[in-house]
Amino acid sequence: RATNPWPDGLQPTLRPAITEYVSGVLGVADRLRDAMCLALNVDPSDVAPLFGSPSSRQFVTTNNNHHHNNCEENDDEEPSFWSMKLVSYPPISPDDTATNKTTTKATMQEPLQGVGAHCDSNFLTLICQDAHSSGLQVQNVKGGWIDVPPTGPDMLICNIGELAQVWTGGYFLATPHRVMLQQSSHGRTSLPVFYNPKLDVVMEPIEDAGNLPWDRCQENQWRRKHNTLMNSVGENSFKSLARSHPAVFEKHHGDLRILEDGRIVKR
């Protein structure tokens, strides 16, 4: 794993602030994971080792807008595989909207797409966003998009990822979400932490998931076509990275190719 560059000369407080923040968010994710176990009649102590112990999380992150941020952790124990983004969306003015080729004067008040509809490939995603503007939307089971209001630093938004869906046999579903940017004099800041088990873990589906009491109405949510959900943390994470960064994938993995369904095979 490569080290993460820090702009210590320009922002000496960034590293300790982010380190403290991520440590706290990972602790919240651990608690949510344990609560999911209790809802599924699973002993949390049986699942916790798959995610690594909190003591192994001696890490740093990097500050790159719109890029994944890897971590460094204690080599004595295989750590959980998490990443973080520091995302900054610029303000959207009427002039910016007018220059969009697909926008007319009649639709200038319509939101612009920041990130298209998708589900995260990891286990859980915890998001802190600023209090000025949001644009984040999540989809309910009937297919309707719900605006997530600006929440500020005192609240975290939790999205369920594909690995949690695989592990629970569909009892918990991955959350479809997107970002639609409204015209605003404020930019939007978002700090998502992507929480995962260890990279080499295979999340076997819970044996009794089909017997759990649940009455879900007919699902009509967005789902990516031809998308294989893999129970291997490494393979499902690699699928997401290959799709999100095809040029980087091609540069560093020229001997591999990604199939339409997300599986990665040798050429």
Image (spheres, rainbow, N blue to C red):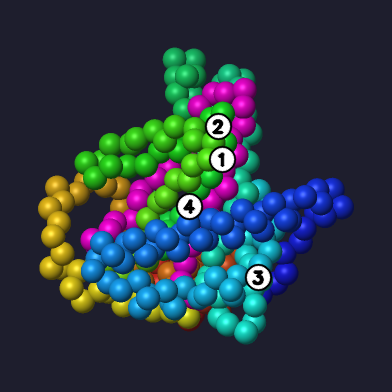
| Residue at which label 4 appears | 126
The residue most toward the top is: 106
Question: What number of labels is visible?
Answer: 4
Residue in view at x 68 percent, y 64 percent: 60
The amino acid at mark 2 is Ala
Query: Spatial distance from mark 1 to mark 2, Cα to Cα?
Result: 7 Å
Q: Position of residue 220 (x, y in %)?
A: 21, 46
Q: Which comes sooner in the sequence, label 4 or label 3?
A: 3
Q: Nearer the viewer, mark 4 or mark 3?
A: 3
Q: Residues within 10 Å of mark 2 (few under 14, many from 20)?
A: some
| Residue at which label 3 appears | 58
| Residue at which label 1 appears | 153
Q: Residues within 10 Å of mark 3 (few under 14, many from 20)?
A: some
The amino acid at mark 3 is Gln
Q: Which comes sooner in the sequence, label 4 or label 2?
A: 4
Query: Spatial distance from mark 4 to mark 2, Cα to Cα?
Result: 16 Å
**Which stretch appears magenta?**
170-199
Q: Which comes sooner in the sequence, label 3 or label 2?
A: 3
Residue in view at x 43 percent, y 77 percent: 50
| Residue at which label 2 appears | 131
Q: Nearer the viewer, mark 1 or mark 2?
A: 1
Q: Residues within 10 Å of mark 1 (few under 14, many from 20)?
A: few
Residue 153 visible, this angle: yes
